[in-house]
């Protein structure tokens, strides 16, 4: 072979799953990350990316020996060369969860130094679960999904993640080239479509740290013009008996069952008692802070911190019956030093990049009896879990949820207690 393997077609036996929607194979001394494969399969793989490092990326373009876990792909647009929406729509639901469990366990062991058997729990059906989606618009004004690792748009709105009705009529309309479409179906079943103007200033992408992650999350749409094209742009969302009205283009759990499920876990694992003090960091609109505030009662205190001012405004409006809960809009790194002392529990739901060394050191320095940490990236979650251990905490409970069926993504919730 030449120095670059780009475009090369080889036959490989794939092994264990890796973090990121692929399985790992080896060929002529190099590692290959092979998408569209399953563990144990013999495949013909075409190299799609080779930067000259010790690994390259490839697609399985022919299955020579299929896994018994293989099914006809549920997503018609995410195959080789297609959209990046679904990584494992060609696997049974059980196999998909087993793949995610293996990845979480491997990351906990390798990155966090924690040996733990992991079970990934189902939240319901494989399809029709996503209530919020972000689409791109191509140069001809057609909406669609981004091709994997590309700015190109796949204009077939056929990914089965979406709840029924989410795509209706979108392809028949013309949109601003280069814009994004934020489409949401809220708890009332109302669809909101917001067109977000093309990005102009991309400098925020240069900061790769956790502060940068928070900034990117806000800048992704916050500094771009928004035009409501359908609905009000204000989504009604319910978690348990509480109701929020939030921006339909802002952050909310994508899976229709996720917010309620996670809030119940936080309620149980927080161990909050009447009169306690608690912190909720990266609080969003306060779904977790509200259940902890209910537990501590009017004699307790819950301090919630969230970077997004709009989320805080919406959160305050939803918790007017909980005077013990205060919400402030600020970076967690800046606000944490001024929070009420001696919290009994700290809840964290950081962005994909995790909380990191500085924040976890500050949390541990406050000596809470318990920490409940939510993470949507296994590697970041495992790194943060290891940091808690280094500060004298141990992982008491762990639950992992298949909140993103057909994809490689998985949500982890861990409770940590002082050893």
Image (cartoon, rainbow, N blue to C red):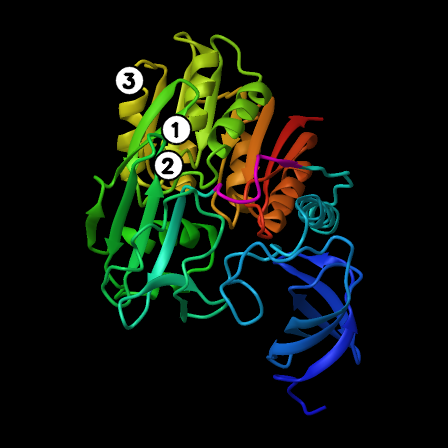
Main SS category, magenta section:
loop
Image-based side of 213 in relation to 19, left or right: left
Q: CA distance from mark 2 to mark 3?
A: 17 Å
| Residue 81 rendering spot, x and y as whole percentages | 54, 72
Membership of 122 in magenta stretch: yes
Q: Which mark is residue 320?
A: 3
| Residue corresponding to mark 1 | 286
**Whether residue 39 is situated above or below residue 233 in the rendered picture:** below
Kindly give the residue lying farthest to the bottom in the view shown. Answer: 2
Residue at left offset 54%, top offset 56% = 75
Q: CA distance from mark 1 to mark 3?
A: 12 Å
Q: Which mark is residue 306?
A: 2
Image quadrant assignment for residue 54: bottom right
Q: Where is the C terminus found, in terms of image quarters? A: top right
Q: Where is the N terminus found, in terms of image quarters? A: bottom right
- Label 2 sits on a secondary structure element that is strand
Label 2–label 1 contact, CB within 8 A: yes
Image quadrant assignment for residue 325: top left
Q: Is residue 54 visible?
A: no
Tell me which numbered mark, 1 or 3, is placed earlier along the sequence: 1
**Whether residue 261 is situated above or below residue 84 in the rendered picture:** above
Say which of marks 2 and 1 sits in front.
1
Q: Which mark is residue 142?
A: none
| Residue 7 rendering spot, x and y as whole percentages | 62, 84
| Residue 143 rendering spot, x and y as whole percentages | 33, 62
Q: Is residue 120 visible?
A: yes
Q: CA distance from mark 2 to mark 1?
A: 9 Å
| Span highlighted in magenta in the image | 121-129
User: Considering depth in this image, is 399 or 95 the residue closer to the camera?
Assistant: 95
Residue at left offset 38%, top offset 26% = 238
User: Considering depth in this image, is 83 or 389 the residue closer to the camera?
Assistant: 83
């Amino acid at each position: 072979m030449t120095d670059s393997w780009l475009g090369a077609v080889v036959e490989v036996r794939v092994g264990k799953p890796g973090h990121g929607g692929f399985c790992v194979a080896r060929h002529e001394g190099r590692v290959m990350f092979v998408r569209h494969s399953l563990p144990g399969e013999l495949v013909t793989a075409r190299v799609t990316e080779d930067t000259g490092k010790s690994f390259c990326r490839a697609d399985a373009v022919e299955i020579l020996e299929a896994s018994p876990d293989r099914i006809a792909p549920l997503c018609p647009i995410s195959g080789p060369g297609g959209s990046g929406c679904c990584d494992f729509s060609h696997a049974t639901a059980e196999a998909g969860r087993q793949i995610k469990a293996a990845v979480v366990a491997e990351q906990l062991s390798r990155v966090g130094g924690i040996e733990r058997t992991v079970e990934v729990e189902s939240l319901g059906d494989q399809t029709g679960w996503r209530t919020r989606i972000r689409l791109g618009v191509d140069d001809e004004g057609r909406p669609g999904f981004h091709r994997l690792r590309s700015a190109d748009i796949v204009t077939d709105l056929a990914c089965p993640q979406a709840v029924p009705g989410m795509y209706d009529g979108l392809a028949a309309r013309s949109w601003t080239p280069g814009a994004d479409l934020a489409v949401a179906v809220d708890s009332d079943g109302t669809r909101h479509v917001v067109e977000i103007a093309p990005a102009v200033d991309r400098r925020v992408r240069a900061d790769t740290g956790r502060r940068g992650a928070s900034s990117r999350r806000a800048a992704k749409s916050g500094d771009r013009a928004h035009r409501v094209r359908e609905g009000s742009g204000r989504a009604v969302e319910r978690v348990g008996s509480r109701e929020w009205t939030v921006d339909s283009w802002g952050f909310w759990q994508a899976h229709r069952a996720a917010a309620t499920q996670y809030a119940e876990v936080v309620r149980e694992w927080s161990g909050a008692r009447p009169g306690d003090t608690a912190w909720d960091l990266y609080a969003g609109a306060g779904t977790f802070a509200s259940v902890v505030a209910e537990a501590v009662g009017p004699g307790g205190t819950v301090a919630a911190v969230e970077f997004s001012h709009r989320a805080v405004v919406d959160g305050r409006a939803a918790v007017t019956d909980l005077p013990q809960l205060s919400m402030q809009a600020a970076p967690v790194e800046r606000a944490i030093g001024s929070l009420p002392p001696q919290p009994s529990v700290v809840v964290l739901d950081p962005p994909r990049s995790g909380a990191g060394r500085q924040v976890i050191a500050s949390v541990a320095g406050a000596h809470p009896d318990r920490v409940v940490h939510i993470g949507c990236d296994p590697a970041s979650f495992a790194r943060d879990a290891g940091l808690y251990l280094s500060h004298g905490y141990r992982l008491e409970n762990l639950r992992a949820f298949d909140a993103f069926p057909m994809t490689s993504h998985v949500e982890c919730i861990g409770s940590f207690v002082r050893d």
